[in-house]
Structures are given as structure tokens and as C-alpha cells.
Amino acid sequence: MTDALRAHGLQVWIDQRSIPVTVPWMEEIEAGLRGATLMAVVDSPQWRASENCQAEIRLAEQWLVPALWLEPGTDPRTACDLVLRRLAAQPPEEKVRAELFARAGQWSINGRRSRDLVTGRARLRYRRYVNSLPAGDSVPPVVRAFLRSSITRQARKQTLRYIGTFIALVLVLVGIRGPEALDKAKDRIDQAIQSFSDMDAFQDAYETGPYEHLALLANAEGEGEAQRWELARAFSVPLPDSVTPADMSPAAPQLRASRRDRSAVSGDRQFTASLTRDGRQVEVKNRDDRLIRTIPLSFTGTTLVWSPDAAWVAVAGGEQVQLLDVQRGNQPVVLRGANSPVEAVVVADDGISALTDRGVIHWPDPFGVAVAADTDAWSGGVHLSGSDVAVLLGRHGELVAVDLASKTVVNRSTVRVAPSVITGDLAAAPDGKTLVVTGVDVEKMTSSVHVVRTVDWSVQSFPIDCVPSGVTLPNEDADIYVACGQRGVGHLNQASGEFRTVDIEQLATSIGIGGNKIFAGTNFGHVFELDPGTLQITGRAGTGCPADVSPIAVMTDGKYVFTGGPSAANFGCAARVTFGAKPKADHLIFPWQTVNRAGVVVLGVNDQQVAYGFDDGTVRVLDTGDFATRTIRRPMADPVRALALSRDGSTLLVAGRFGAVRLLDLSNDDRDNGKQRARAAAAVAQGRKLGLVR
């Protein structure tokens, strides 16, 4: 069952395979349960008789982890289907619970550091969740302590801001030597406040409005990465590009017709979304009128409309326009810039339009350019060296080649597999002439490797004796290396078809190649360096990640290994690992990213940029040398399953687990803060021209 779930792309934590005997069992079990969204229990007599198993279920109840009870002997495919259906039906609050408990637990493990506490909307969201629990649901003490400490820290910072303002005012008044000094008083006060409030000033401006936020950033000084994060966040969702008088807008008739629509049917006729009577929730029902999700709103909604792909619902109310992820309950995307009440909203191919008393405000599509790839689900993707073509792998062997320059599909092919086979991993040779695809038959529990030649898209298949969790190859005709979980690392000889595995002490969860070395991520947070011939360990580095290191991306020369994995934002699973006399891991920091798994890590051409894709649909692009942020975007609600950067780094392809494919323009996402501040000033000027700046 575990292998079947992994084959579906789920992260599975299992105590008997994931805990070394040298580590106290219950501590590790508790760490594994804290951030879990579901506990699957095979209710066998052996499970009932086990003292350890009974302790596990008590811990799960303590941490409010929901349990799915399975009958002994349930076949893996049925069990997997039950788990998938249960996860799909879980409300958004369950994700908030897992997120909050994981952060609270890690805060406790790290010695209750103040930097691990939360502020702003995250703190409010967690408090709202805890307050909504029924009286009988007891929250673990460490979680309540985490929230109390977060509230105290925010109050303390607010007090320091007031003190800073007072001191700055005194300093300014004392320093006045004449009326001309009054002109500089405000600037001196602003600088003093900013020095005392750290990044709180940017957060306050962000929550006030986009143009206030951009104006503060445009006038800020310094080249720090914290400001680069803020600039990237400011441009993560497009601002309005036009305001048209209502009688001149082509969208006006449709907007007027939907002005008071409080209920809407999706384009595929599968779902209905409705505002509740008080406008504080959106209820989503299927075609059988069964309620499948309730989404709370932070404002009072008055009208709503579906996106064409039925992945989002756009809800308007007051000056707010939010795009709600109705499929998986991720955090909404907020369209910023409307400065008057929105009466209606419509979604079209060219973007989103809203009717206000100022006219029709239009935003460009916040999710980039859609590519019609016509595949229901993606497993992975690669960039073909020497071209601007990326190849995507579907869950059942579909191969779709997309030209990043022309933004079109240029080839379709298929690896012929049985209906019960899930194709999960895709790798490309450095010359781009060969692809390798792995497959797992979830009924027969057999596995295979398929070699695809991109010259004619011919396929050669090999059986392998392990469940793969990653694959790589050094060149077109070279041997293939496979991450084989509990069996270690596998080696496939293309010429003879011989396959062997070598134990590497831990479970191999990912694999890559660079600098004539093999690198394997493990389930204990390590990255091993292996000799390609013998597959013996020649070096090891710990990331501090308490879970699977998967995936990894290796530089061509093997200098750095970039890692992803579950809870990458908080637990150190996202890191840059280097080997040598003293291997080390430099952890990456992802502000505003909570506990979403980093399921994709890819390097750009010449290894100058690294892109991370997360399970909430967010992507982040960074420079590999100093981790400077290039961009933060969220082009979809789907978990990201594939990324590919164009040769010049100006275009990023993003593919989601459930079939979405988007192309993002990164040409304006420069790492230079000075250029981005100039861009912020230009955006404020454009907003003033459109009459959107208060």
C-alpha cells in the first residue's frame, strides 16, 4: 500500500521503515504525526495487540490527525483509492491544522526561537482555526504556547514601533533649527520608524494596498534580500492595466448581467458554487447536490463567477476580489488595486474584469499564458538541452513537447503502458537526445524503465526489480541509475538489460548526477555522494530535514546539490548541499511559504538559476550563487509537478498535477533592487494615471 501511495505522488511516512533503531521511537512518531493530514490504520489483530501501535493512535488523537480505518487484506489499489478520496474530501481547515501543528512542533524542537513564530494573517488564521474547534477537541499545550508567544511577540513589536515613533519625533523636534528643517521632518520620522519596525512597515503597507506598498518600496534604500522578497511579492500578482468607462467596455454587458449572481455553475457543469446568506462563506456542491467544500471568506462576498477551467471561483465584495481554490482549498489569490466597491466580476481569456463605480477595471491573467496540452495529470517534466523545448510526462505515459518560445505544443507521443501503470519519473540525458521514464503497475506491483529517443520518439522498455522514486542518466547510451527506496540505488545496463541494486544504509528517495558522481537523497534528510561504478558511498551531507529528501537537482559539475521535500519552507528540507573536505548544507528561506511540499526542483541553463515548485501552486526562482530571489509567483491551484526554464531564463513553464500548463514571463524579474524600485515607482505612476491611487 505504501508503494502504491508513493507511486501516486503522495508523501508517505511509515514508522517501521523510516525510523532508525538508535532514535527514540515515540519522539520520531510524534514528529511524523504533527504535520500529517491523514493517518491510515490497517485494523488488524496484530495492530490492536501492539502497545506501540496503540500509543501511535493516542498521539494521533492528541494532535487531531484524522484516521482512515482499513480492513486487513485490503488490496493496495483499493486502499490507495480510499486514501485519495479521503484526502480530496478534506476541508481547508484540515490543511490549516496540519500547518499550525507542524510549525508549533518545529518551534518547540528548535528551542522555541522567536524567529519561528508567526505574525499577521497566518497568526489570525491559526487563532481562527483554534477558536472554531468544538469544546471537546483539546489543542496540544505546545500549540497554545506557540500561539500565545506569537501574539506576545507581535504586541511587543507594535510597542517598539510606537516607542520608535515617539523617539524619532523628539529627535526631529530637538534637531529643528529653523522652518526649513520642517520639510525634512517627515522623512526623518519615516526612516526612524522603519529602523525600529524592521519589516513590519512593509507588511502594514502591503495590507493597506498595493500602491502604498509599492510607494514604500520605491523610496526604500538598501540591497538586502528581505527587500528583494518584498519586491518579488509586490509583483507576484499583476496590477490593473486599464480602467475603461462602463459604457465603452466590451465586458460591460456580461458584467451587468452577472451583477447580483450569488450562485454559479462551472463550465463543465460538474460543480455549483454559492454564497451563503451572510456572504461570509462559499459552498461548493457537485452535480448530485452534495456539499464537497465550504470556503470561509475574510470579507462579505456579494457576487461570484467560475474560471473557465473550473479550478477557481472569483468572488467580489466591497473593494475585494479574491480567487478561491475550490479544488484543494489552498490560500486565495487576492487581486489588488481596486479602490472602489466591486459590483460584478467576469473571467475571460485575456484576464479578469470588475465593474465598479469608476468603470471597468481589468487585470491581465494572473496565472500566465495557458498551453492546451490536453492531458489530465502530469508527473514530471524536463528541458531538452540546446533548445527551448520542454517535455512533459503524463501519468499514463503521455509525452508532450512544448516550445517555450512559440508557446505551442510541437510534438505528442506516448509510452505504451497498461492502464494500471502509473508513469512517475522523467529524466533527460545532458545532450537532450534521450529521455528515461519510470512506471509502476499498481495492480501487479511491478516496475519498468522506458528509454525514449527524441530523434524519432522510439521506445525501449526494461523491467526493474524495485519501486522507483527517481531516475537519472549521464548521457545517451550510458547506464541508468534509479532511486529504489528501501532497496537503495539501482543500476540498469542498457546494452544487456541487467539490473542490480546496492544498499546505501537508508532509503533512496531521489537521485541525480553531476561531475561524474551520483547523488542520492534519503529518507533521513541526507544526501549521499556515490561512485558511479561501484555505487559505494564516497561522501555524505545532512540537510537537517526530518523527512524524505526528494527531489534533488545537481549542477553539471556536481558543485552544488539543491534539495526539496516535504515542509520545505520550515524544516530545512530546501537546501544547497556541497561536498568536499567538509560537506555542508545551506538552507533556503521561503517567506510566506508555510508547510507546502517543494515537489519540484530544477536548474536553469548554465546552472545560474534554480526554480522550486510547491504543492500550493507557488513557484520561486532564485540565483544559485547567493540565493537572491528572482520571482515569486502562483500560477495555478494544482500542486506543481514540472518546471522548465528557457535558455535565456525569461520564460518558465509550470505544469500542475491535474493537467494545467502555464508559461510565465520572467523578463522583468531582475535581482537588482534598484531596477525593481524603479519598476515599483513606474507602477505607482501608472496607478495614479488610471485613478487608482488614493
Image: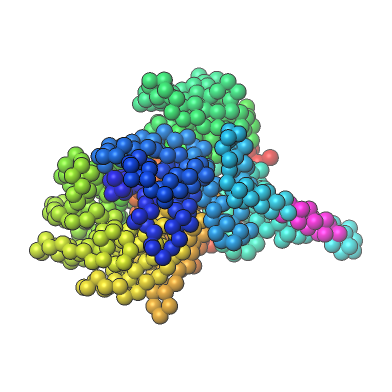
As displayed, is residue 355 above or below residue 128?
A: above
Identify the residue shown where x is 25% and y is 60%. 487
Q: Quadrant of the C terminus?
A: top right
Image x and y of residue 602, in percent: 36, 58
Magenta stretch contains residue 165: yes
- Residue 83 magenta: no
Task: Give the x, y percent position of residue 116.
Answer: 59, 56
- Residue 80 on image: x %, y %: 31, 40
Residue at the extreme bottom: 581
Magenta span: 157-170
- Quadrant of the rendered structure where residue 195 is? bottom right
Vertical placement of residue 287 versus 403, above or below = above
- Residue visible at 65% across and 62% down? 221
Magenta span dominant secondary structure: helix
Image coordinates of residue 297 in percent, x first then y, are: 57, 32
Question: Residue pushed farthest left?
Answer: 496
